[in-house]
Image: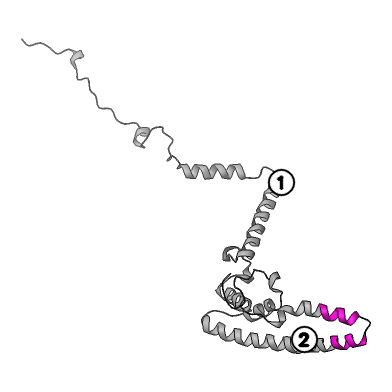
Amino acid sequence: MFRRRTTTEAPAETATEPTPSTKAGGTGGKGRPTPKRREAEQARKTRVSAPRDRKEAIRQQREKSRSERAKIQQAMATGDERYLPARDKGPVRRFVRDYVDSRRTPAEYLLPYFLVIFIFMTLPMPQVRVVATYLWLVAIIIVPLDLLLLGRRLKKRLREEFPNDSHRGALSYGIMRSTQIRRLRMPKPQVKPGGEKI
């Protein structure tokens, strides 16, 4: 009736404690979290793009400089603020450019005007030389007067539009731009004469 239990009938299930590798969550016992795919790709790109020698470093630097110059040239053509030089950045400088480009001034024709005077002065005709002298006098009177008026009007508009911003260098920036031929201005004009957007 009373039979002794044999050792073979002992409970088959025994508690198994998890190993440290399984406690860490995982599969694989690395001791560190698996990197994300994006981080792994970035690390791989960094390893690939790292220069192997001095020539490779110089080549990469040239490519980087070429890319930056292309961005600046594109910005000069489109007025993209992100890649403009420091002297052309900011809402104040953009306003000055648009203000100057929205009107025609005698100063922008100064270079071709002086070229005509120079040609007249080289001609072997006294009457033509006298005319060139008068044209020279007209230029040295009208152009400075026009630039003075432009500076006063621009200064007033800047105070109205940007009362809390610095206007340092803005007047000279606008005056210098007004003396350039319109087609050669950089950044390129974004408004037509009269104020209409291009």
In which quadrant of the rendered view does residue 33 lie? top left
Residue occupying image coordinates x 68% and y 55%? 66
Q: Quadrant of residue 172?
A: bottom right
Give the spatial CA distance, label 1 vs label 2: 57 Å
Amino acid carrying mark 1 in the image: Arg
Of the two numbered discs 1 and 2 on the same chain, state the one appearing first in sequence. Answer: 1
Mark 2 neighbour density, 10 Å: few (under 14) some (14–19) many (20 or more):
some
Q: Which residue does the image show at 22% across and 22% down from the upper left?
A: 13
Residue 111's x, y, as percent?
Answer: 77, 77
- Observer able to see residue 14: yes
Q: Secondary structure at mark 1?
A: helix
Q: Which residues are magenta?
A: 115-132
- Label disc, if present, on residue 139 of the rendered structure: 2
Classified by dominant secondary structure, the portion drawn in magenta counts as: helix
As drawn, 10 above or below 142: above
Q: Which mark is residue 54?
A: 1
Q: Nearer the viewer, residue 159 or 6?
A: 159
Q: Is residue 162 visible?
A: no
